[in-house]
Amino acid sequence: MQGSKLYVGNLTYSVTNEDLVNLFATYGEVKNANVIEGRGFGFVEMSNPEEAEKAREALNGSEYEGRTLRIDEARPPKQNRERKGGGGGRRY
């Protein structure tokens, strides 16, 4: 694992940032936790890649709040997306 930021999926909508910090703190220092409200997923940043891998291995597929967690290394955000194709009206 190269990075220390994890994607945490299949969360119940009631899970908070603090809940994620408490869940992941067992596996190392949590630098940041961010639940995306109303979307069922979030991100956790650990202090180093080794701790992130340890947390991923331990928690991926485990049950939390009645749901099976999906945990993976977070992908970097897509930036500078180019608009390709697409129609568009004529300008008069």
Image (cartoon, rainbow, N blue to C red):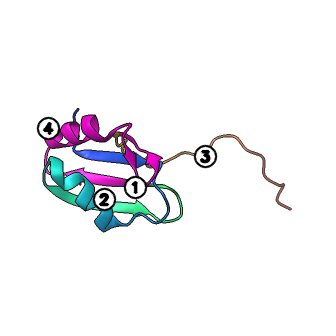
In contact (CB < 8 Å): disc 1 and disc 2: yes
Tag 3 near tag 4, CB within 8 Å: no
Please report the residue visible at 63 percent of the width from the left and 41 percent of the height from the top.
Answer: 84
Q: Is residue 90 left or right of residue 41?
A: right
Q: Looking at the picture, tell me which residue is in the foreground, 8 or 15.
A: 15
Pointer 1 or 2: first along the chain? 2
Query: What residue is pinned by disc 3?
Result: 83
For the residues marked 1 and 2, what is the alpha-carbon distance in whole angstroms?
9 Å
Instruction: Tell me which numbered mark, 2 or 3, is placed earlier along the sequence.
Output: 2
Compute the Cα span from label 3 to label 1.
27 Å
- Separation (CA) of disc 1 from disc 4: 20 Å
Dot 3: within a 10 Å radius of its alpha carbon, few (fewer than 14), some, or many (20 or more) residues? few
Earlier along the polypeptide chain: callout 1 or callout 4? Answer: 1
Dot 4 crowding, Cα within 10 Å, few <14, some 14–19, many 20+:
some
> Which residues are drawn in magenta?
42-71
Q: Between disc 3 and disc 1, whose residue precedes?
A: 1
Rendering coords of residue 24 (x, y %): 23, 52
Q: Amino acid at mark 4?
A: Glu
